[in-house]
Image: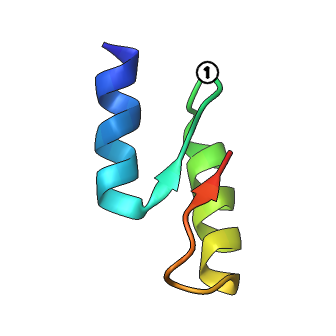
Amino acid sequence: MAPALANAIRNATGVRFVALPIARDKIYLALKDAAASTPTQLTRI
């Protein structure tokens, strides 16, 4: 189930998570960092 959740988050945000657990603070910080980068870049966490 974790891979499906990680893929759903990637599809929704464009941020790829490769380490568990995927906590809301990790998602928030990754989105904040991704906003500072170019929109065509995928961020890998």
* 17 with respect to 37 (left or right): left
Q: Quadrant of the N terminus?
A: top left
Q: Quadrant of the C terminus?
A: top right
Locate residue 13, reporting x and y percent.
Answer: 40, 61
Locate residue 15, reporting x and y percent.
Answer: 51, 56
In the picture shown, does residue 26 fall above or below 29? above
Amino acid carrying label 1: it is Leu
In the picture shown, does residue 39 fall above or below 8? below
* 3 with respect to 15 (left or right): left
Q: Residue furthest top?
A: 1
Q: Residue at x 43, y 62 (%)?
A: 14
Locate residue 27, reporting x and y percent.
Answer: 57, 50
Q: Residue at x 39, y 49 (%)?
A: 10
Which SS class for mark 1? loop
In the picture shown, does residue 4 fall above or below 41? above
Label 1: which residue?
A: 20
* 1 with respect to 21 (left or right): left
Q: Residue at x 39, y 17 (%)?
A: 2
Occupied quadrant, residue 3: top left
